[in-house]
Image: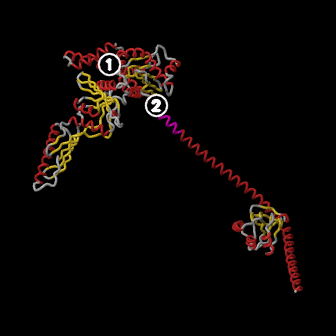
Amino acid sequence: MTCIFGVDIIKGSLQGKIKPRYAVFIIDNGNEIEKFGISRSKLFRMIREFKPSMVSVDNIYELFKSKEELVAFLRQIPFTTKLVQVSGHLGSLPSLAKRYGLKINIRSPMDEAKACAYLAKLGVGEEVSVFIDKTIITVSRNRSLGKGGWRQNKYRRKVHDAVRRVFKEIKKKLDELGLEYVEDVREAYGGISKGTLIVNAPKEKVPINSFRTRDVQVKVSAVEKDKIEFIPLKKSKPHVIVGVDPGTTTAVAVLDLNGNVLGVKSKKGWNPSEVIEYITSLGKPVVIATDKSNPPEFVLKLRASFQAVLHTPRDDMSVERKRHLTSKFVFLNDHERDAIAAAMDAYNSYKNKLRNVEKRIPMGMDVDAVKAEIIRGTPLKDIIAGEESKDKKEAEPPSQSEEVKALRDDLLRKDRIIRELEEENRLLRKEIKSLKDEIERLRARIVTLSKEEHERVRRENYIKTLEHELKELRKELREKDRMIEELNKRIEVLKRMKILEFRGWKGIKVLKKFTRDEIERLEKSLGINEGDVIYIEDSSGGGKVTAEYLCDKKIKAVIVRNEMSHLAKSVFEERGIPVIDKSEVEMEIGEDLAIINSEKFEKLYNLKIEDMKKKKIDKLELLFLEYKSRRSQL
């Protein structure tokens, strides 16, 4: 038997002013010892004295306020002692105690310490690990050499030689044990001043302890991890009830034996191996359930894979019943609802029986495992008897006949498992062949569809290209039609002008605006020559400078459609170029050309010239009279 400590804090805290006190429950060779109101320092002394196999606590931070304190504690206690944290990832202490039939008062620290001890004994909890599987052995001088006197070199040589001899002895011991290591040596006068060995083994596997001699000190320590790790004492998963809804979309719901949902998942095209992997990640199936009275082949295969009990309803489950069973649960689709309903229907069929059995399970037995055996049909008395005989066998070595019988039973069980696995293997091979054929068919279909799709895409792209080209051509055609229409109009005008020219009409040039840019454009395209008649369509923008620029071209006359500015008009009159209103002449207007009736124009032109001459004479006479008047006044 081993010694186990269960510890729970009574009052106080590590950070507060009141120092903590602890309740300690010790299981030592079948004896139970209770210690109440123990201080932390006394508790640590008791651990070093009793050297228990395990020290079990509800939470490690009831004993240590930092990682440094935890590491220092684990370095001081025997390497055979494990520090175990019971609660945490596995659940709370009360729930774990209930699962293993331990009746405790949660307000009693001694009851909680007792629960910690017994749970650790049953393999429940997580070992607190802060060291990796490497050990550092450091061999160095035990004293400072100092300045010394005339015999200092001899003393230095003696100390360094002692360090070298101890270092070599430790290496020899490690070589004998076949342990791998890496060494680092600092050489000094007469030997070495320091040698370090990093051994590829945990501290408990290295049979060397720290010690000191007069000249040499040896320090053996484990290598610390970067962070605290919690390693389960027993890697066991809960027994579960699994509801399955197979089909194109397969759904699985997993419940524990208390009716709590551990997981629900649905997936399209979910293959059996992935379904099995998902279920085993959550627990060990005891019941495989379906909502159909006639179970599908997929469900039967799952049941055979797990050697579980099959649960089916008497009749196919109605939608109303499914809704009633799943009203308290959250699910994504009808497939998940059906899987949960199947699992809940199976749980409800066993619920009362499991609750009655739970009250009669002796303390210390795994309630979850007992419930699983009850569901499989094993009577409670046989389970208890089997557990007692198992404990007896562990306590007493089995006789040869018992060993033979146990081996025979084990072989028979393995033969049965092999036969079941062979049958399952045959079914899976058949399904694999069917799936391979389906894959090949689908691949051929994909190739066909790919060709059709490629051709369709190519055709659609070609059609889109043609449609774009057609759109551009139509646009270009409309532009050409517009140009042709304009050119036809211009041709008609030119034809008409030409006809009129034969009848004595004269061509003149057209300025759309009375600006210098427009004058330069007309000069570049048609030229402005001496004696040309210019028609200005919009004369409102021109001024004195523009008029002078046009007059410099020595034109004959200007015809305007609207009123010209006074300054511009005066420039033309001073240069002897008449400004004629469009309404006074007979003319036809084209794009850059126009024609006028030359006979009528010439008559009007001569009249304008005569009028301009007369105005000049009148102006001179007026100036002469004014001059004469001024002379007479003098």
Q: Is residue 76 left or right of residue 61?
A: left
Magenta: main secondary structure equals helix
According to the image, label 2 marks what residue? Answer: 442
Q: Secondary structure at mark 1?
A: loop
Residue lying at 33% horizontally and 24% vertically, measured from the top left? 111
According to the image, label 1 marks what residue? Answer: 363
Where residue 97 sits in the image (x, y, percent)?
35, 23
Query: Which residues make up the magenta segment?
Result: 439-455
Give the mark nearer the N terminus: 2 vs 1. Answer: 1
Q: Residues within 10 Å of mark 2 (few under 14, many from 20)?
A: few
74 vs 243, nearest the viewer: 74
Query: In the rendered view, would you say 238 is above or below 230?
Result: above
Q: CA distance from mark 2 to mark 1?
A: 59 Å
Where residue 228 sits in the image (x, y, percent)?
32, 37
Q: Is residue 195 left or right of residue 543?
A: left
Q: Quadrant of residue 356?
A: top left
